[in-house]
Every structure is written in C-alpha cells, then in structure tokens.
Image (tube, rainbow, N blue to C red):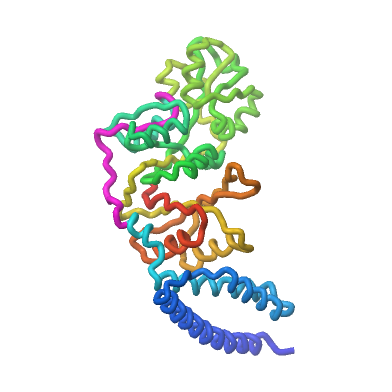
Amino acid sequence: MRDLAEIRKSINEIDDEILKLFIKRMDCAKEVGEYKKDKKIAVLNEEREKEILKTIEENGGDYGPCAKLLYSNIMELSREIQYNIVGSGKKLRKVLESAEHKLPKKGLKIAYQGIKGANGHEAALKLFPESEVLPYKSFEDVFKAVDIGEVSYGVLPVENSTAGSVSAVYDLILKYRFYIVGALDLPIDYCLCGLRQSEFEDIETVWTHPQSIAQCDNYITKHNFTAVPCANTAVAARDTAKEKRLNVAAICSYKAAEEYGLKVLDNHLQDNDDNMTRFIIISKKLYIPKEADKISLCFNLPHVSGSLYNVLCSFNSLGFNLTKIESRPISGSNFEYLFYLDFTGNTSSENAVGLLCRLSEEMPNFSFLGNYNEI
C-alpha cells in the first residue's frame, strides 16, 4: 500500500491534467457560443445534454452517479459562457438599464396592512417618515392599492426571525410580481396589556396575531393563557379596549398599548430576545440604488432531473450567497412549485446580470423582483 504522501502526489498530478483539459473544454464552449450566436441557435439543448449525461453515467462504472454530477456542473458552466457570448436576456437588461437609482420618499402615500399601532404601521413610518401612511385591511388590499396607483408603495412583512415566513405575502409577491425596492429589519418587542382595571392575575385569554402567538409561544404556554388569533396586534389592542373584559389582554407593541389606552401588565414577552420582522417595500416601478446589496427573483423549475441542484450550483460557482429560498405551490397544479430566492449582489456586476439573464432564458415563469438595500 502506498503511503499518503505518494497518493497525494498522484492526485496533484491528475488534478493538473484535469485542469488543463477543463480549460480546453471551456475554450470549446466559447467556440460553440460564437457558432450559436452566428447561426442564432438556442444555447440550451436539453436532449443533447440528457444523452451525454446518460452515457457518462453508464460509462462511469462504480462512479457513474458522481461522474454524472460532475459533468452536469461542467455543462452548467459551459452554458453560462455561451449565454454571455450570445447576449442573452436582452429584455431583462433593458429593464435593469431603465431603473432609477434614488427612491422618492417625501410627500407620498404609503400603504400598510393593519391599523394605527400595528408593526406594519411602525415599519411604514420608519421607512417613510415624511409621507402619509395609510391603513388597509388585508395584505392583498395593499397590493391592489399599489396596482391601481392609489399609493406609491406598500410596506409588508415577509419574515420573522422566530415564526418564519409570512406565507400569504410570499403568495402575493408571486401573484403580482411587483418590484421590491427596499427592506427593513424591525425589532419586535411585545407587551401584555389590558384594561386599566385589570391585573395580571385576572388574565385568562390573550388576543394577538397568529405570528405573534408563534413568537410568544413559550410565554403563553407558561402562563396557561388561551390564545385567540386576530387580524393583527393593533386590532387585538383596539378590541381589548372596546370589549372591556377584565380577563382578556392583548399581546401587542408598546405603541399599540399607548394608542388604545391600555395598561401594560407584563414586558418583553417574545421567546427570542433578538426578535425581528423583515418588512419589504413593493412598487410597480423599479428603483435600484447604487449601493444595493440584495437581489430577489422567482421562477418555477423545468421538468428536468436535478434542475434545482443545477440552479443552486450556479450561485455557488459564481460566489453568490443565497440568503433565502422559499417554495410555494402553484395554484391549480399538482405538486408544482414556484421558488422565491434572495441572494447578495448588485446588478452593476456582470456576473450577477449574466446569471439573471441565463435564468430568465431557462427558468419558466421567471421574474426579476428587485435589487435593493436592507436596513
């Protein structure tokens, strides 16, 4: 048996040969790209790739599946080169070029879901302190208001650090395909508040939003409270004040407690001390600040084995960090899903634009959703 040093020497020599051959193969991919550009031939040829991968797996012996994976990645990288040569994604490039850099923030009308004192209200005020913020009953009402031009932007929650994604909002993002032009991470601190005459020992039932129930689950369980879901935390506070029941309290923000004249009975209820909710700004018009650092997009996958893996490999090979991937079922389709992705990057980077353009050519129902800052 050879010792480890000898084996590693052989590996290094083999790697040197593999690298030389890889460079030759990529040079050939460039030639193919030039030919396809000249002859106006589509870059992706699924049938040829399937045939090649099948042959590779059959000839790979015990390493057949691994060889198939390796060559699938090589083909992915080859297509990346060819797409850049043929100038793919012309429509998307025009959209990116037309984007304005500065997001107007003064003297506008801004929509949020809920009522005064809700977390959405606070997020809208933080993002647009010099504009009029308007309440809407439902998440979709916010989208509709943006759609008809009743407001300039909508501010909506998409994710909480404890309770996870707000699925209803992601469904609406994928339905309307508006641009995301900004984001805010809002610290969430909940209090227990009741009538002025109430004491903590009186409370049996708490009213709050389902997300807040999840964020304060340990606290609710510890005190054996019955949790009743409400439209949002501010509605819970308002209704607690209206109903005037000594045994009912709201789990809400301190601002909501103050807004509706309630007494704070307990503080800092959330299970996670670093509880945060991410809010996004939606717009029908695209704005991309020069210092934007997050890109969002959505698509559904072609019916090809390993298609999601190949997409994820593309991000990895180009050094992009995926920060969010969310799958949502497609209405009316059995076991088909739309994917929402966030990754760090800026569309001033040709690598980022090249990747987006390639995905726009290959992925069904692709939409670029924005490149923005998260504060």
Viewed as shown, does residue 104 lie left or right of 274? Answer: left
Q: Is residue 340 above or below residue 238?
A: below
Q: Nearer the viewer, residue 166 or 304?
A: 304
Give the residue at x 43% y 15%: 261
Q: Is residue 373 magenta?
A: no
The answer to whether residue 159 of the structure is visible from this angle is no
* Quadrant assignment for the C terminus: top left
Q: What range is drawn magenta here?
A: 97-116
Residue 235 spot, x, y in % from top left: 48, 22
Give the residue at x 40% y 73%: 85
The answer to whether residue 26 of the structure is visible from this angle is yes
Residue 207 occupies quadrant: top right
Q: Give the mark count.
A: 0
Residue 160 spot, x, y in % from top left: 51, 40
Residue 363 spot, x, y in % from top left: 51, 58
- Looking at this view, name the residue that lies furthest to the left: 107
Q: Is residue 260 above or below residue 111?
A: above
Residue 364 spot, x, y in % from top left: 52, 55
Q: Nearer the viewer, residue 250 or 316?
A: 316
Give the residue at x 51% y 82%: 25
Q: Is residue 102 magenta?
A: yes
Viewed as shown, does residue 67 lie left or right of 311? Answer: right
* Quadrant assignment for the N terminus: bottom right
Q: Nearer the viewer, residue 72 or 360?
A: 360
User: Which secondary structure dominates the residues rendered in magenta?
Assistant: loop
